[in-house]
Image (spheres, rainbow, N blue to C red):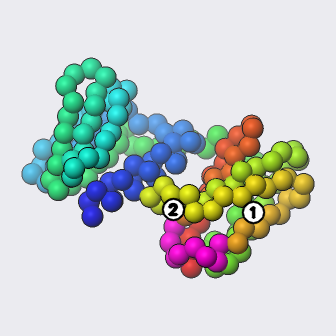
């Protein structure tokens, strides 16, 4: 259970990092109260293996934590997400949210580029992939076959990547 929550947290952070993640340290708090702070720039890789979190560093020996002994992982200073497109100029709009059967996507873009629309589960699996040609502003995706839960829509083309999260009822 802890492994799944940690993996989910890191996947969510990977998704939002497309918009620019500003963190300097990874703080690991163990149930016994011990806290370890590691510079993000010194982390080569994070590996979840055999009920352990193994952190390979660029400088220094690897660090390992038993997942069952972890209380939480945080980033400091407080993680901020910079939106590369100001809200007033945001191009991607999805509705309704929460959705039941049909997700509407409004691109509000003048280009005629082809977009790749992918829907990801919270644990990183692609559950739907579809090409959208931007010859109309409003596009629809049928999501009735998806299970209830939180999903990420990622739209990409040759110029940019945009993402939005939605909840399926």
Report whether 69 appears left or right of 130: left
Disc 2 packing (10 Å; few <14; some 14–19; many ≥20): many
Location of mark 2 (residue): 121
Location of mark 1 (residue): 105
Magenta stretch in the rendered image:
143-150
Report whether 56 appears left or right of 81: left
Q: x%, y% of residue 70? A: 19, 52
Report whether 169 appears left or right of 13: right
Q: x%, y% of residue 54? A: 24, 39
Residue 38 position (above or below residue 106): above
Residue 87 position (above or below residue 167): above
**Which residue is nearer to you in this view: 24 or 9?**
9
Task: Tell me the residue at 77%/67% (across/down).
Answer: 140
**Which residue is nearer to you in this view: 146 or 5?**
146
First in sequence: mark 1 vs mark 2: 1
Task: Tell me the residue at 66%/48% (across/down).
Answer: 162
Q: x%, y% of residue 73? A: 29, 48
**Which residue is nearer to you in this view: 108 or 7?**
7
Q: x%, y% of residue 10? A: 39, 49
Q: Quadrant of residue 169?
A: bottom right
Residue 155 included in the magenta stretch of the image: no
Whether the residues at callouts 1 and 2 have beta carbons within 8 Å, the answer is no
**Which residue is nearer to you in this view: 150 or 117?**
117
Query: Secondary structure beneath disc 1?
Result: strand
């Amino acid at each position: 259970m802890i492994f799944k929550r940690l993996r989910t947290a890191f996947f969510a952070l990977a998704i939002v990092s497309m918009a620019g993640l500003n963190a300097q340290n990874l703080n690991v708090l163990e149930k016994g109260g011990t806290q370890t702070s590691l510079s993000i720039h010194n982390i080569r890789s994070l590996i979840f293996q055999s009920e352990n979190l193994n952190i390979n560093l660029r400088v220094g020996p690897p660090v390992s934590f038993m997942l069952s002994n972890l209380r939480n992982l945080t980033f400091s200073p407080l993680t901020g997400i910079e939106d590369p497109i100001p809200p007033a100029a945001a191009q991607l709009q999805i509705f309704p949210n929460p959705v039941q059967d049909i997700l509407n996507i409004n691109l509000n873009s003048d280009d005629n580029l082809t977009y790749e629309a992918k829907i990801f589960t919270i644990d990183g699996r692609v559950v739907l992939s579809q090409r959208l040609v931007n010859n109309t502003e409003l596009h629809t995706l049928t999501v009735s076959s998806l299970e209830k839960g939180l999903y990420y829509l990622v739209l990409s083309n040759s110029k940019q990547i945009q993402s939005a999260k939605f909840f399926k009822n």
